[in-house]
Image (cartoon, coloured by chain):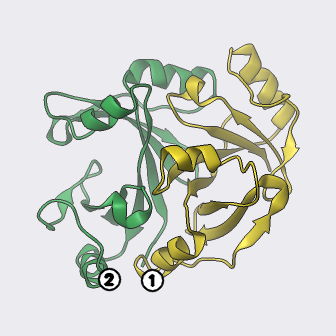
Chain colours: A yellow, B green
Amino acid sequence: MLGRLNHVAIAVPDLAAAAAVYEGTLGAQVSAPQPLPEHGVTVVFIDLGNTKVELLEPLGEGSPIAGFLEKNPSGGMHHLCYEVDDILAARDRLLAEGARVLGDGEPKAGAHGKPVLFLHPKDFFGTLVEIEEV
Amino acid sequence: MLGRLNHVAIAVPDLAAAAAVYEGTLGAQVSAPQPLPEHGVTVVFIDLGNTKVELLEPLGEGSPIAGFLEKNPSGGMHHLCYEVDDILAARDRLLAEGARVLGDGEPKAGAHGKPVLFLHPKDFFGTLVEIEEV
């Protein structure tokens, strides 16, 4: 079922500062910041050739990463996103296996406009898992 | 400087249980466990096509992931490994940029037998970064 690793998401308290470190210190290619108000984050993408890192900064009230940054004020790895061919088939398999899908279980349009779902980190040894149909 | 994402490492308290979840629930291809006593971990690899996930379980006394699992008893994302062409040139650039290299600054043979270095997570917004020469 699991396809490629679409991205690793890293939550940071200051996107401009983090982008400067990835660009300057690590010599990475960092995109311009994109505000995604419907997701409560501003994001930059770091293209690594085979996959990408997304740096996320909270945007607006009730950002889904606000709680994570309260617990991890310096930032940290937030979730992994895996590609799947068919998100509804993947969801049904996961539910049948006893995994918990967050929210109402219906796929939403993710940061790339593709349908995504998030899975409970307690079912995956502390890792928040996103699946994205590609 | 940054090349491809070589792997995402996830520390888990019980490797057999985690491998079963990745294989059964997520339908991933999981390798046989490899004990790496010189690194203080047992590892399985999950091939995702474009990159891989490594699940790590502590092995022996003083495992480098023991402290992480004390703080995160269910497990969690532990580090990201990026490929570089020349690890000594990468190290010198990082030091010149003010980043801290862990240990004595001399590359060691990593889990794949290639030279690796680890960088201080405080310099990278809470993410432990490994660089590996490929």
Q: Residues within 10 Å of mark 2 (few under 14, many from 20)?
A: few
**Residue A41 seen in render:** yes
In percent of the image, x 27 and y 73: which residue is there? B87
Q: Nearer the viewer, residue A113 or A75?
A: A75
Q: Which residue is mark 1?
A: A24
In this picture, residue B105 sits left or right of residue B73: left
Q: Is the residue under label 2 in contact with that under label 1 (CB below 8 Å)?
A: yes
**Which image quadrant: the N terminus of chain A?**
top right
Q: Which residue is mark 2?
A: B97
What residue occupies the far front of the structure in this picture?
A61
In percent of the image, x 61 and y 43: which residue is there? A67
Amino acid tagged 1: Gly
The residue tagged with tag 2: helix, strand or loop? loop
The dot on residue A125 is none
Query: Residue B26 appears at what percent x and percent y?
Result: 63, 28
**Count of numbered circles in the view:** 2
The chain letter for the residue carrying disc 1 is A
